[in-house]
Image (cartoon, helix red, strand yellow):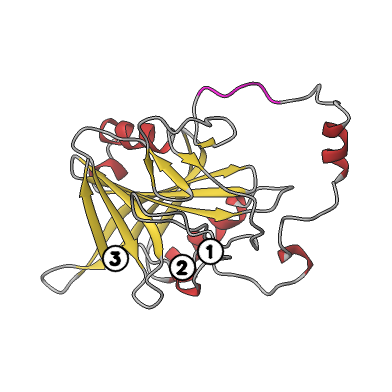
Amino acid sequence: MGFLRRRARSAEAEPDDVAALSADDADLADGEDDDAAPARERGPWDVEEVPDRGDRIDVGALWLPRREGMQLRMEVDKTSRAVTAAALAIHGSTLQLQVFAAPRSEGIWDEIRGEIAESVTRQGGTVDDLPGPFGRELLARLPVRTAEGRTGHRPVRFLGFDGPRWFLRGVISGRAAVDPEKARELEAVFGDVVVVRGNRPHVPRDLLPLTLPGQARPEAAAGAPAAADAFDPLRRGPEITEVH
């Protein structure tokens, strides 16, 4: 599923970092920030809001909160060997995280939700667009093949959050996808993630580079591997698992 497939590089797909100040930036530079948004009570956070990593796990563009009994699985693209996602498993449910570059001036979650819904429906699944703790989200029922050879459906929740020049996507699977009580712990994890966007130019929807825990940040990487655009929640890639 190309849920974040890259578009043709038209004017709206230009790199979101530009040398000149926009009109909004100029206002801020002049100190005209009277309409600044109030401090939020929950994340996901930008590193400018939470500059101290504390006990979070550093995996490059994401700082991940620790939870007792949590398993961290880093998903790696077979061809490029690039790390494409982080998946946190707690009490039988999983939260998969990916973070993407986004335009400076607007969010992309509204548009992406429509693309996900269209893709799920095209594959024979169903999807509902519902309000959630982080805004609008999708509850999808993805078609899967059972052990008996029949077609079944697996429920997953798609969460999205538009940050400053980044977009964080979470996919909850397992019991937490349909049980609100089970979901609270993974929702709290999603809301405690810190995104380290960096200043490197990226085309909107480029996957921001992730690393294995303890691995040096990939300073030379300029963008995402093409395989990241074909993310499919029905198929897992090679995995490296750590227990925290």
Which of the two discs, 1 and 2, sits closer to the camera? Answer: 2
Quarter of the image with the N terminus is bottom left
How packed mark 3 is, by other alpha carbons closer than 10 Å (few <14, some 14-19, many 20 or more), is few
Q: Amino acid at mark 2?
A: Ala
Asked if the magenta segment contains residue 215, the reply would be no
- Span highlighted in magenta in the image: 37-41
Of the image marks 3 and 1, the number of the one nearer the N terminus: 1
Mark 3 element type: loop
Mark 1 and mark 2 residues within 8 Å of each other at the beta carbon:
yes
User: Which residue, given by chain and number where applicable, does mark 2 sit on?
Assistant: 228
Dividing the picture into quarters, in which one does residue 93 lie? top left
Q: CA distance from mark 3 to mark 1?
A: 17 Å
Q: Residue visible at 31% across and 52% down? A: 155
On the image, the x and y values in percent for residue 77 come to 37, 70
Of the image marks 3 and 2, the number of the one nearer the N terminus: 2
In the picture, the disc for residue 236 is: 3
In the current view of this chain or complex, which residue is farthest to the bottom?
Answer: 79
Q: Amino acid at mark 3?
A: Arg
Q: Residue visible at 70% across and 48% down? A: 106
User: Which residue, given by chain and number where applicable, does mark 1 sit on?
Assistant: 4
Q: Nearer the viewer, residue 109 or 47?
A: 47
Of the image marks 1 and 2, the number of the one nearer the N terminus: 1
